[in-house]
Image: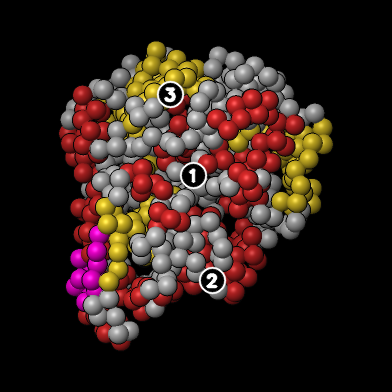
Amino acid sequence: MAATTAALACLAALAACSGPPKDSGTGADFKLSVSTPEARGEIDSFTWAVYAEPPTLDYTAAFDYPQNTILSNVCESLMRWTPGLTMEPGLAKKASNPEPRTWVYDLRAGVRFHNGKEMTADDVVYSLGRQMDPKNAAAWAEVFQNVASVRRTGPLQVTVKLKRPDSQFPQYMATAGGVVASKAGVEAAGKDYGTTGGLACTGPFELGAWNKGQSIELDRFDGYWGKRAKSKKVVFRFLTDPSARTNAMLSGEADGGYLIPTESYGRLRESGVGSLYFGEGLTTVNVNVTNMQGPLGDVRIRRALSLAMDRSGFVKAGLGGAGTSTSSITPRAVWAAASKPARKAALGALPPTKQDIETAKALIKEAGATGKTLTVATSPIGQDVSLLATAVQAAGTRIGLNIRLKTVAPNAFTALFTDPEAREGIDLFPYTSYYNISDPLDLLANFRTGAYLNFAGYSDKGYDKLVAQATAVYQQGQRMEIEAELQKQAADKVLWIPVAEWPTSVFLNKRITGAPTTISYMYYPWAADVGAAK
């Protein structure tokens, strides 16, 4: 998740200062880079393939790939993630932490929204307030759970008072959780905000035409306060079928795309029409446990399924060889800044990644679970999803379980992350988990009682206490010692079944270049860097 402004980004020793390990070698058939070659000039437009149409571009609901891939170029946050996965100033030119429960954001002067109005502290207070308003059911509401107040303390200054010290809050201000939009613009749009008209943000692009079911266009905002975008227009094409996305890139109908279907890595590499790149994704591919009321309430069954998984086979077939087997639900890169003892505690005693069918069978028999039925959701989004679901079925069948697959459409699959009703009757589903910040707690906090992504309703008072302790510690090294214990507990209880680490993939044809290769594209205005390759 490159150099930053030290006084700002490292003030509280945030994990985002460290970034991923500097070694780009993976030991596999791919190599990680931070970005693609820099663009040489401007272009009129380029077209980008995305796997689903966003239901809304309201920043409070931006919690998945399609929304954030687009929104990151239109709406900006107080802080900013960089292609090197570090944090730097965004709409706030400075952030300070005068005492543990106070964060002060001094804003840039002269920043204009797409509606022409100048950004003020009132807009920031209003924008963050929308995330906190229960009526909005914001996806980012948990980020604000420790916030007592957000107040204007000057024309260009906002002060956030916390109920208790919170090491995570300032880091999340570089995500969609910290987006600033025009109060007047949002109020004028009313209930239609995020679905029609403009988004009243400050980014290098503004929302243009939205052709429902087909595409979203972004137009360059020439009143942008920062570096001007190299392309006058970006067109995002919705292509839910993986083959259609690949064919569009091969034919030139789309100039590029992120989240390349793994089954297409070979075709794109050998096509001669462009280049396939990989970058640090801070991403793990897991089997998400969504129901602990049934058989999966017994940890022995969860352990058995984990032991029965053919991880190396999935990496080869499901990820096109571009990945590494893992039994850690957190990517190794987020432990880069940890001390050797903390790193060893977090990663040194994990369960084996190698398949062990006999031990798994014994656990199923011991639990009296032979013949028990589990339902796994799958979707034709891509081979990574469909083949992982099939791998779970194969693993469960070999150890005596009855695994049923339930196929859902790509848009319905996205709903599994936000809608409890969509998860009814489902015990497990393939879950690619990406980090929003480069701190282990970003994922580990998801198993706290009542957490937004705690789909199975796991609850343990001891675990909750450790999450609270880690959250309250600003000193990075000390915090990571606590996070290492959380990692050990999550692994022991098999709260999810980790399968592989997966790099970010991006394809660019020969016409364009400049896009970052890392997961930064979720919160960094990446499209502004894309321009002519020659």
**Residue 296 location, x and y as percent?**
37, 73
- Give the class, few, some or many, for how many residues have Cα within 10 Å of label 1's Cα (few <14, many ≥20): many
Q: CA distance from mark 2 to mark 3?
A: 42 Å
Residue 429 in which image quadrant: bottom left
**Residue 361 location, x and y as percent?**
24, 80
Residue 376 in which image quadrant: bottom left
> Which residue is identified by label 3?
210
| Residue 225 visible in the picture | no
Number of marks in the image?
3
Along the line of sight, the residue nearer the viewer: 209 or 305? 209
**Residue 1 vertical placement versus 216 (above, below):** below
Q: Residue at x 66, y 45 (%)?
A: 133
Farthest residue, direction bottom = 366
Helix, strand or loop at mark 2: loop
**Residue 417 vertical placement versus 7 (above, below):** below
Residue range highlighted in magenta: 394-405
**Residue 291 location, x and y as percent?**
41, 67
> Which residue is identified by label 2?
459
